Amino acid sequence: MFSPCIDPGHGGRGWEPVFNLSMALLLRTALVEKHPEWDIEMTRELDLINPSRPARAEIAMMHNAQFTLSIHANASPTGDPREHGPLWFYKDEVGPEKQIGKTILDALFGSGLMPRGEYIEEGTGRVRPMKGNMHQARPVGWTRRSYSVLRHHGSRPAGLLECDYYTNPKARAWLESMEGKKQLVVAMIAGLETAEGLLVPKGPTP
């Protein structure tokens, strides 16, 4: 049996904590329907609860979660409203997290999202590279970064999805739309199914 943990990032008031929780709850509902055999845990289920990073990892460990998916929305560090696109953060180059993230991002890009490092120029409709984009060297959307929320999980696999930039008006409208939420849920389910295939021991072939 597969035991994933869903971690809605942050907590308290504000757009992002509320969005993170709403996405996590939608994901859990869809997972219960599609995979009733999975044992699903969440690090929080209320808006105003904001567990510490070590507490989130402890919840996952107490549940004996095989993989933790942390859900976030991004904000442009430069204030550029054109910044957009999902990102996947993981901590182990040789572990399963990279492949899990690739599955999620491939599903999102396949649904029509543009990779980071590019934007559509208004007026011409041409695809242009972002100038000064801090992640332009990795425009496909995944990156390795030692986020503390991931480090606290120790050797247990965990990954963090930045769904898109809520500081970009168009991206925020997509994040708030039911179509955007459905695309994110489908992509995250695909990622968790990949996690199950990589992490759950296979039984003997009859």
Image (cartoon, rainbow, N blue to C red):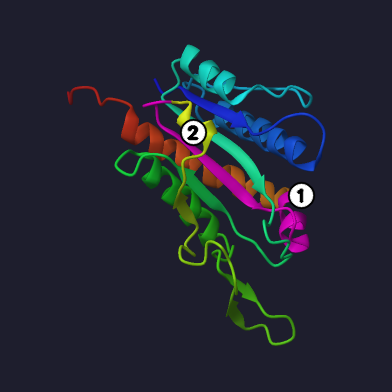
List x then y, in percent, for residue 59.
55, 16
Residue at position x 68%, y 57% from top?
Answer: 76
Quadrant including the C terminus = top left
Amino acid type, mark 1: Glu
Query: Is residue 176 positioned above or below 136 on the image?
Result: above
The dot on residue 57 is none
List x then y, in percent, for residue 191.
46, 42
Residue at position x 49%, y 45% from top?
Answer: 89
Quadrant including the N terminus = top left
* Mark 1 or mark 2, whichever is nearer to me: 2
Amino acid type, mark 2: Leu
Question: Crowding near pointer 2: few (<14 within 10 Å), some, many (20+)?
Answer: many
Residue at position x 49%, y 33% from top?
Answer: 150
Question: Crowding near pointer 1: few (<14 within 10 Å), some, many (20+)?
Answer: some
Q: Which residue position is annotated with label 1?
A: 176
Q: Which residues are magenta?
A: 154-177
Q: Earlier in the sequence, mark 1 or mark 2?
A: 2
Pick whichever, 133 or 125, lies toward us. 133
Query: Is residue 111 positioned above or below 72 on the image?
Result: below
Pick whichever, 124 or 84, lies toward us. 84
**Residue found at the far right of this picture:** 13
Specify whether residue 133 is painted magenta: no
Residue at position x 63%, y 29% from top?
Answer: 29
Q: Which residue position is annotated with label 2?
A: 150
